[in-house]
Structures are given as structure tokens and as C-alpha cells.
Image (spheres, rainbow, N blue to C red):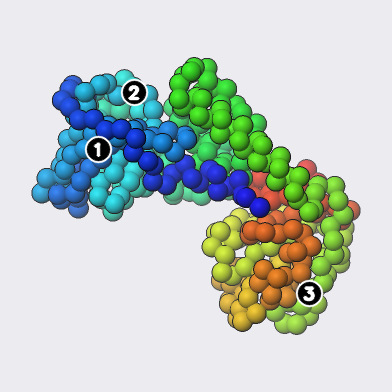
Amino acid sequence: MKKISSFILLLLPALAILHACNGQGGHALKGAIEGAANLQVLLEQAHFDRSSVALSRSTCDASGNFEIKLEKPFEAGLYRLSIGAKKMFFILDGTENTVEVKGDLKTIDRLDVQVTGSPTFTCYADIIGGLLKNQVKSVDEARMVVGKGCNPLMKAFLTTQVLGQNAGAFMDDFRTAAANLNTAMPGSKYATDFSKMVSDIEKQSSQQYADETIQVGMPAPDISLPGPDGKVHSLSSLKGKVVLLDFWASWCGPCRKANPHVVETYNKYKSKGFDVFSVSLDRPDGKEKWIQAIKQDGLIWDNHVSDLKWWDSAPAATYGVRAIPKTFLIGKDGKIVAINPRMNLEEELLKVL
């Protein structure tokens, strides 16, 4: 099953260079980058369809200073600056003349830079810096981040970055971003490409839902498997509680990254009838790693089970799990109320708790 998140995450890898031009003009990007001595510099204008246009190249001097001069004024758009192997995305509003960037090569990809000459660039760098320091933990927080965008293009780009990993659950947000971008930049490649991307996500989301083995409203099939100590735990024993059925594994990086939010939600609502039932897809020789991961991640609830059969896990087959993390929120009556609630877990939980 093709994951929606894979579509969004393709926005940020290396973009194809379609055209290059060099020249002298009154518009320039200057930089003073520590650790970038003698490295090649490339400025590109990037687009939502993963294409890009090479604008100009330069070379840092022995102190890491460079200047890229352009024949034409900056356009409102997304840009990518490559210095050696490091890459930095940013946004301009088209009013800029000379933009200056100072920073360290080690951290420019995190937008840890000082910018002059572009309030829009500064705005975007501040938002990304805040995101990297404070992980978004709820839908409301995510929408607040998007709302900080200084123009519709920035808000559209932030929508892909903040909500893109579970895009199908946030179609209204993507539609709103597309409508606002079309109003602000009618007929532009940005507006057209973003609208097409939203349409593609909608189609993919609909197909994915149609392919789901388990759907909202269905009774949750029971799971009875041993825990780390050999004691058998059954999902059906938790009927009467709201339960997050969580398929994960110790070897799954995204699962481990998602665990702190699950722990936080469990601690917040366990006294109100919320519980977690964790099914591990660890390998046959992975029992010790499974136990260690439970301890390391602070997964303090009782119900941890696994048949240690990796992708041949029987519960995974029953629930149609083809990628992890995969979660199902189960209501007090034992029926599925939400599929893959992640960032919006608390929002979904409060509907039925």
C-alpha cells in the first residue's frame, strides 16, 4: 500500500535542474558561511512538483563568503541554496533586492542563520527554528505553526511540512491552503502545482481507505498473544475502555519517534478510561530488543504483546498492516472509531472518551 506520507516527503529531496543562467544585475544573494571555504554554491527556484530552475552559481572564497548576482529580480517563491553538499530551503516574497545570509555550514540546513534584506526569509527561518526546538504534539499546535506563515505560499509549504505525514486526515487544511494560494498567486505554477498535489492526495487517500481491511465502525478483531513475560494479554479484555491499538517495533525509527506522544497521551488520560494495547512486529530473535525498547521509551502500560514473527505477524495480517507505525483507536463498545490517529490522537480521543 502506498503511503500518503511518501508523496509529501518527496517534496524535499534533490530537485532536477532544468535551466541555468548567469549574469550581473541589481539583485543578489550574499553569504558569509563559516566552514564553507572554497565550496561551490548553487541557487535554485524550487516548485511543488519537485522541479527546479537553476538561477546562478558561485564559489565561496577562503573565508566562506560568496555573492550570487541575478539578471532578473527575485520572484515570490520557494528557493533552495546548495553549498557543497548542504542544502537550505527558504521563501522570498519578490520584493527583495539584496539578501544576506550568515551562518555555519554545519547548521544551515536547519535554517540556523541570520538574514538581512528579507523579512519573509526571516519569518520562515524563525518558524522552522521553533519547530526544530519544540516538537508539534497536537493538531492545534500544528495549525498554529501553519498560521504563523507570513503569506499564502509559506502557509501552503508549511502545511506540507507540518501536516503532510498524515495528509489524508487533514484534507480541509490542504484545500484551504490551495484556495488561499490560488487567490494570492492566480495562474502561477505554485498555485497550479499545489492544487494538483492536493487533488492527488485526495485520490490516494480515497483509494487507501477503500483498500483498508479494517474500517471505521467495524468491530475490532480480538488479539491474544503473550507479553515479554509470557503472560497472555487479550485486546477484548479492555472492552469498556477507549483503547489505542498500536502496531510498532523496536527497529522502527518512526515508531520510536512517535512513542513519546503516545506516552504523554496515556499519562494524561489513563485515569479517564484510556489504555494502550501495543503489538510489536519484532523479529524472531528480537525479544531482548523489544523488551529494551519498552523500557527505554517508557511504555508503562501493561498490554505489550508479540508473536515475534516480524512481517508474518498474525495480528498485522488481520488488521491489514503493511507499514508501521499503524494505529487504530477503539471505542468503549469495541468498534473502530479512527484509523492512524497520530498528531490528531488527542482530538479523536476526546470525541469518544
Q: Which mark is residue 225?
A: 3
Give, as a three-letter code, the residue at label 1.
Val
The 10 Å Cα crowd at callout 3, few under 14, some 14 to 19, many 20 or more, is many
Q: Which residue is mark 2?
A: 75
The reply, left or right, for residue 208 in relation to residue 70 is: right
Asked if 325 appears above or below 284 in the picture, the reply is above
Choose the circle earlier in sequence order: 1 or 3.
Answer: 1
Asked if 182 appears above or below 327 in the picture, the reply is above
The reply, left or right, for residue 216 in relation to residue 147 is: right
The reply, left or right, for residue 348 in relation to residue 19 is: right
Give, as a three-letter code, the residue at label 3.
Leu
Q: Name the mark nearer the viewer: 1 or 2.
A: 2
Question: Is 144 or 31 nearer to us in this picture?
Answer: 31
The picture places residue 309, in percent across and down from the top left corner, at 69, 75
Choose the circle earlier in sequence order: 1 or 2.
Answer: 2
**How far apart are labels 1 and 3 at the CA level?**
56 Å
Secondary structure category for the residue under label 1 = strand
The picture places residue 7, in percent across and down from the top left corner, at 55, 44
Question: Is 4 or 141 nearer to us in this picture?
Answer: 4
The 10 Å Cα crowd at callout 1, few under 14, some 14 to 19, many 20 or more, is many
